[in-house]
Image (cartoon, grey):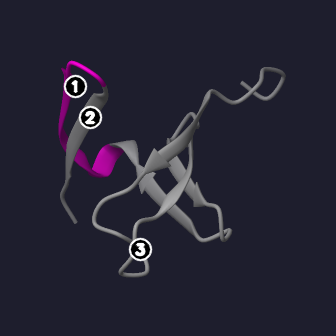
């Protein structure tokens, strides 16, 4: 995947909030996990092996994705 562009989703909100407030940022999908980068350049990495369940639900006016991160 080094010669390809990294898949990204922009303008996402992460929960729980990183700094106690609404955190907007970009989610990147890498070969070994996901990386969330906030607009303030705070970085959170989640390895795929640490994700226990992932749910995708389409709502009427927006999309909601929920995953269970077990540590």
Q: Up-down: is 5 above or below 65? A: above
Task: Decide which of 37, 62 is in the foreground and name it.
Answer: 62
Taking 2 as reference, is 49 above or below it?
below
Quadrant into which the C terminus falls: bottom left
Tally the numbered discs: 3
Instruction: Work out how far the residue at label 3 is from the one at label 1, CA to CA, in angstroms.
Output: 22 Å
- Residue at point 66%, 71% (across, down): 40
Q: Secondary structure at mark 3?
A: loop
Residue 35 position within the rendered picture, expressed as x and y whole percent measured from the top left: 54, 51
In percent of width and height, residue 36 lies at 53, 54
Q: Quadrant of residue 66?
A: top left
Q: Earlier in the sequence, mark 3 or mark 2?
A: 3
Marks 3 and 2 sit apart, C-alpha to C-alpha, by 17 Å
Instruction: Name the magenta segment's main secondary structure.
Output: strand
Quarter of the N terminus within the rendering: top right
Residue carrying label 1: 56
Residue at the disc numbered 3: 18
Q: Are marks 2 and 1 in contact (CB under 8 Å)?
A: yes
User: Is 35 rendered above or below residue 42?
Assistant: above
Along the horizontal axis of the image, is 48 left or right of 61? right
Label 1: few (<14), some or many (≥20) within 10 Å? few
Q: Position of residue 65 (x, y in %)?
A: 26, 34
Mark 3 surroundings: few (<14), some (14-19) or many (≥20) residues within 10 A: some
The circle on residue 65 is: 2
How far apart marks 2 and 1 lie (CA) works out to: 5 Å
Left or right: where 30 falls relative to 1: left
Q: Which residue corresponds to the image point at 29% horizontal and 52% vertical from the top-left?
A: 50
Q: Is residue 10 magenta?
A: no
**Which is more toward the observer, 23 or 34?**
23
The stretch of residues the image draws in magenta is: 49-61
Residue 51 is situated, as x and y percent measured from the top left of the image, at: 26, 46
Q: Nearer the viewer, residue 21 or 4?
A: 21
């Amino acid at each position: 995947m080094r010669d390809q562009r990294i898949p990204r989703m922009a303008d996402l909100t992460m929960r729980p909030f990183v700094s106690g407030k609404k955190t907007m940022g970009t989610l990147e999908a890498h070969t070994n996990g996901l990386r969330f980068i906030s607009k303030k350049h705070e970085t959170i990495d989640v390895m795929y092996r640490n994700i226990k369940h992932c749910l995708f639900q389409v709502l009427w006016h927006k999309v909601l994705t929920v995953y269970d991160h077990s540590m």
